[in-house]
Amino acid sequence: MSDKNLVPLKDRIKILRTHMPERDAEVRSRSFEEVNLGLVAADALTEATRCISCAKPGCVVECPVGVKIKDVVALIYAGDYLAAAAKLREDNSLPAITGRVCPQENQCEGGCVLGKKGAPVAIGNLERFVADFERTSGQLGLPANAPATGKAVAIVGSGPAGLSAAGDLIQKGHRVRVFEALHELGGVLVYGIPEFRLPKSIVKGEVDNLRRMGVEFETNVVVGRSVTLDELMQDEHYDAVFVATGAGLPVFLGVPGEHLNGVYSANEFLTRINLMRAYQAAEYDEPVYDCRDRDVIVVGGGNTAMDAVRTARRLGAKSATLVYRRSEAEMPARLEEVNHARQEGIQFRMLTAPVEMVGDEKGWLTGVRCVQMELGEPDDSGRRRPVVVKGSEFTLPANVVIIGVGTTANPLIQSTTPDLKTNSHNYIVADQQSTRTSKRGVFAGGDIVTGGATVILAMGAGRKAAASIHEYLTTGVW
């Protein structure tokens, strides 16, 4: 698509990046309503005007699902928002979701030329704008499906990898059925990300769009227990299976006292909030140990830890503190989430590591014994290794502690599929490009292969899997 921007190039680069409107911090810290409010059309036009229409757009190179961003932005500039949404959906089955939770600053926006001397084009905000415009307009621009191939694909897991693969495969004419272990569809999108960052209605809307395209869904099916991979292929006659179960097994600290009442994994805490409706406490019985007027500590520095501590604040915590063993510069959480947390009154204790959970005689948590850390030489992650400062022990009061330091692979499918190769950490071994596993007809991608990563990287794996599955079903070659 040629550059039809009428604003001279020298003037475009002078336009400041448009700020996304946000709900007031004091108000939102007591509410689960969405924090970011979205762009209005005039602001979207201003932001689209900033694009300098690179001959070789780095934003596309850095997008894990290969969205034709330059074309999308040009359509927004032209005011054809529905065409922009349709262009998005050619490569991204979940634009309203990725427009909200994708770390664009490290991916598409990180490849924007404008970012070298100033602020990159707000690609994520524009993506959200057109996806929301399409949804509210009622004029859905779903891509057409190819003629039916007669082939059937089972997808295990309805998270971002599974949904992305489903969207691509249904377009190629295959029958697609997604199996989900829980009672709600969306995987980590619904159980792991809180309402104030990603409303459940947005996820439901994107799932419904896939339904309209012909994707079938079945909930409450625990593959590996309700049915095995072999049974799916041999008894239910699926021609291929894509395993996209994520990495949902929580990791704990391994310190004394983690058994005390009031200690949660971030997975359990957020799942109870999201799927058991604790964010609607007026209508639903409280499914978590009451955070109101209590001291809550969340351990970790990633987006999950940030989600947990901001959620605790909204549940009425007297104090909500994030404890992280490195400095803020090493935190993997998105800068936007860190800034929002600070605005909402979250306390940060950097260079601090828990060494023991302390409780009373009845088994209830009363505090966390910690040590101060200092940064040493870089470790394998490239971040400076935290080292204990001798004699620095101290205790923080706490009634609730939430451990958000990571997850690992759930072993259920692997344990019931002996010819499915895994590594020493029980992740499924799959080729990085083709997503093929050691078992013929079985593909795997997303967190169950790589370990915990971002929504968009999982979606990228889903797209790779769909292309590889289509090739296999078309040629029969393994």
Image: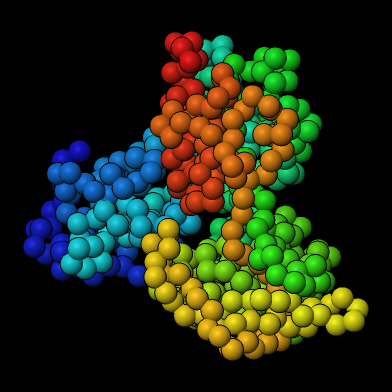
Q: Residue 71: x, y in percent?
A: 26, 42
Check the picture and name the quadrant holding the N terminus.
Answer: top left
Q: Residue 341: x, y in percent?
A: 52, 76
Identify the residue shown where x is 47% and y is 80%. 374
- The quarter holding residue 87 reads top left
**Is residue 348 visible to the viewer in this orientation of the structure?**
no
When the figure is inspected, residue 148 is found, relative to residue 105, above or below; the finding is above
Horizontal arrangement in the rendering, residue 368 relative to residue 204 (left or right):
right
**Is residue 87 visible to the viewer in this orientation of the structure?**
yes
Q: Residue 66: x, y in percent?
A: 34, 40
When the figure is inspected, residue 466 is found, relative to residue 255, above or below; the finding is above
Identify the residue shown where x is 63% and y is 45%. 409
Horizontal arrangement in the rendering, residue 357 relative to residue 424 (left or right):
right
Identify the residue shown where x is 81% and y is 80%. 359
Q: Residue 3: x, y in percent?
A: 15, 45
When the figure is inspected, residue 109 is found, relative to residue 339, above or below; the finding is above
Taking the view exactly as shown, the residue that stands out farthest to the front is 390
- The quarter holding residue 241 reads top right
All told, the count of numbered labels is: 0
Foreground pick, 238 / 421:
421
Question: What colouring does the structure picture have?
Answer: rainbow
Foreground pick, 50 / 172:
172
Identify the residue shown where x is 73% and y is 15%. 235
